[in-house]
Image (spheres, grey):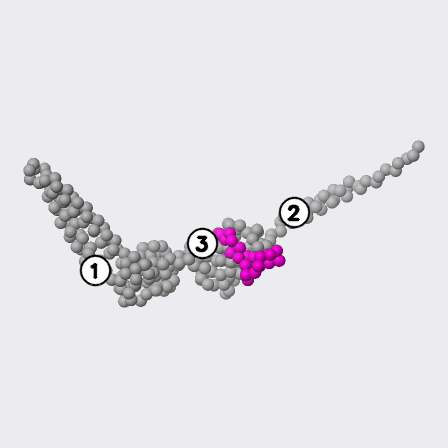
């Protein structure tokens, strides 16, 4: 009778050690964070304040570098003509209102006033009301105030210069409109998501500014332009935008170069 030799089995202790070692390596790998740094620049989205009417710039209430609050007066164009039209419209409305009231009282007495006269008085009163509203709008358009708080980044006209309708006179930069734009390589874009934290480093400041990745542009760009191929994918980048709390944003300046660090 032939005896089949038994196959030797590794000791159970060796299996346990191997499993423990695999778990340790897995935990270490999961705990690793991937950080990378890219270059970018500070960008500002400006608010241009203009009048819908033209005229010479009579008063400029702000200067470049001023900080303004909502409702602060910015500038005023000459409104001599608009003031005269406003006064005339107010006087005409006062007269038509008085005439309308008189026609209403006469209509209460049979035979003293016709329905036609009352209708004409009402129509004239309505026209004068619309004329006054237009005159008030024209008058108010000649003086503009700050729509929101921000920095007076620039003034585009001097006192006495003619300003065409719709041409901005004051350029505002609200702090919430200051952001950082940078380009993330295609090989790294999958590692960042809207809402991720970002550290922004600027020259001359020891501590980084803390921002939040707000937006990833959906279209890729080439830098420099090349023909698309698998070999050129390392030149493919995506623009991303990072915003900051207003108290942080006011410390940044449009055009300023920065380094941006991402990582969880």
The quadrant of the rendering that contains the N terminus is: top right
Q: Where residue 123 sits in the image (x, y, percent)? A: 17, 45
Mark closer to the observer (1, 3): 1
Magenta residue span = 210-239
Could you say which is closer to the camera, residue 118 or residue 31? 118
Q: Residues within 10 Å of mark 3 (few under 14, many from 20)?
A: few
Q: Residues within 10 Å of mark 1 (few under 14, many from 20)?
A: few
For image coordinates 68% across by 45% down, the residue present is 23
The first of marks 3 and 2 along the sequence is 2
The secondary element bearing badge 1 is classed as helix
Numbered label attached to residue 27: 2
* Magenta span contains residue 119: no
Residue bearing the label numbered 1: 81
Q: Residues within 10 Å of mark 2 (few under 14, many from 20)?
A: few
For image coordinates 44% across by 62% down, the residue present is 254
Numbered label attached to residue 245: 3
For image coordinates 33% across by 56% down, the residue present is 146
Q: CA distance from mark 3 to mark 2?
A: 35 Å
The secondary element bearing badge 2 is classed as helix
Note whether 58 is above or below 28 in the view shown. below
Q: Where residue 85 sits in the image (x, y, percent)? A: 19, 56
Total numbered labels: 3
Q: CA distance from mark 2 to mark 1?
A: 78 Å
The secondary element bearing badge 3 is classed as loop
Residue 112 in view of the camera: yes
């Amino acid at each position: 009778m032939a005896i089949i030799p038994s196959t030797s089995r590794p000791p159970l202790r060796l299996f346990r050690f191997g499993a423990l070692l695999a778990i340790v390596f897995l935990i270490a790998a999961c705990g690793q964070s991937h950080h990378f740094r890219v270059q970018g620049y500070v960008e500002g989205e400006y608010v241009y304040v203009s009048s819908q009417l033209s005229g010479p710039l009579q008063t400029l209430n702000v200067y470049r570098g001023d900080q303004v609050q909502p409702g602060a007066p910015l500038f005023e164009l000459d409104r001599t003509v608009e003031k005269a039209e406003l006064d005339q419209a107010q006087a005409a409305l006062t007269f038509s209102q008085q005439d309308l009231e008189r026609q209403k009282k006469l209509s209460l007495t049979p035979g003293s006033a016709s329905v036609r006269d009352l209708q004409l008085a009402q129509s004239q009163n309505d026209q004068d009301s619309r004329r006054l509203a237009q005159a008030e709008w024209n008058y108010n358009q000649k003086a503009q105030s700050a729509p929101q708080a921000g920095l007076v980044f620039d003034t585009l006209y001097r006192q006495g210069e003619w300003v065409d309708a719709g041409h901005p006179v004051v350029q505002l930069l609200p702090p919430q409109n200051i952001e950082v734009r940078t380009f993330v390589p295609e090989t790294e874009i999958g590692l960042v998501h809207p809402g991720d934290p970002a550290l922004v480093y600027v020259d001359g400041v020891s501590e980084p500014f803390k921002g939040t990745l707000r937006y990833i542009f959906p279209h890729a760009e080439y830098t420099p332009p090349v023909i698309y191929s698998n070999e050129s994918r390392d030149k493919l980048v995506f623009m991303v935008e990072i915003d900051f709390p207003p108290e942080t944003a006011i410390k940044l300046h449009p055009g300023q170069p920065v380094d941006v660090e991402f990582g969880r």
